[in-house]
Image (cartoon, grey):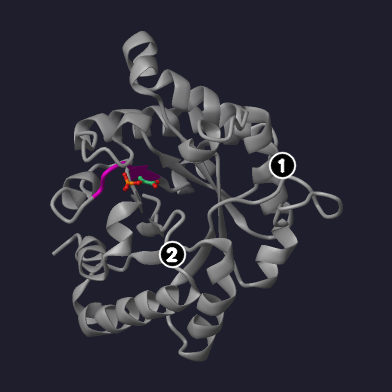
Amino acid sequence: LTERTPLIAGNWKMNLDHLQAIALVQKLAWGLADVRHDFSAAEVAVFPPFTDLRSVQTLLAADKLSLTLGAQDVSPHESGAYTGDISAAMLAKLDVTYALVGHSERRHGHGESDETVGRKARAAQAAGMVPMICVGETAEDLEQHGAAAIPVAQLTAALAHLPEGAEFVVAYEPVWAIGSGQAATPEQAQEVARALREHLRDLVGDERAARTRILYGGSVASQNIAGFMRQPDVDGALVGGASLKVDEFTRIIQFQK
Ligand code: PEP
């Protein structure tokens, strides 16, 4: 049996300035220190806006806090004349471990193609970060193709850009569940996570497929986290709105209790 460390990731989206970010991370770290002996051995990651990363990194390093840092996006380009972009090297230099690529708000709000998502994943990986590849079907996709077809196709397209042996995390986020308060059922999440892992076996081999963490995201809350974490192919959660509320996010992290 392959051990996959559970990962609870908080995507703050476009919320919190750098002072609010520091306050949230401090409160979160204090809360977790109190319950640390009592909660699952989950890895906890936060994904602040770019402008908060330096402040959060400094705080984590100074206080030796065991939270991992992620970025919400990354440029597909290495450097140069790309006004407004943030490169993978810049993020890696700030001790950023994960880079979200292909979040539905980027795919649908900014028209990012599978090709762009794949190139971003590659840029993150080349700089030493772990791409967190987000995939998920819209309500319309679900009706027309079922739940798994689109996520599987999106993952296949992204992985075509990564070299053999590259580490990555998959976040399955049904678009209809994000920010809607209408989470998938644990069984729905498991069905797609299982299909993704099955497909990964063909794409990256049995061993890598067994080691790859697949997260569920979409209206995760303290009331529903345990159901997702009980599923054999769901290894964690990508949490949006609820990650901005320290008490709620702490309860989510304590999912096994
Ligand atoms: C997300 O931003 O990835 C997300 C899943 O949001 P929410 O938890 O608010 O649905």
Which of the pair 209/133 is nearer the observer?
Answer: 133
**Which residue extends farthest top?**
144
In the visual, does 118 lie left or right of 236? right
Residue 44 spot, x, y in % from top left:
38, 66
Which of the pair 145/72 is nearer the observer?
Answer: 72
Find out whether residue 79 is within the magenta segment.
no
Residue type marked 1: Pro
Residue drawn 43% across and 18% down?
Answer: 149
Q: Is residue 140 visible?
A: yes
The residues colored magenta run: 215-220
The image quarter containing residue 127 is bottom right
- Which is nearer the N-term, disc 1 or disc 2? 2
Element at label 2 = strand
Between circles 1 and 2, the one closer to the viewer is 2
Residue type marked 2: Val
The image quarter containing residue 255 is bottom left
Find out whether residue 218 is within the magenta segment.
yes
Q: Which quadrant: the C terminus?
A: bottom left
Q: Is residue 243 above or below residue 146?
A: below
Confirm or deny contact between disc 1 and disc 2 (CB under 8 A): no
Residue 46 spot, x, y in % from top left:
43, 64
Residue 22 spot, x, y in % from top left:
43, 79
Which of the pair 81/233 is nearer the observer?
Answer: 81
Q: CA distance from mark 1 to mark 2?
A: 26 Å
In the visual, does 165 lie left or right of 21? right
Residue drawn 65% across and 51% down?
Answer: 74
Q: Which residue is mark 2?
A: 46
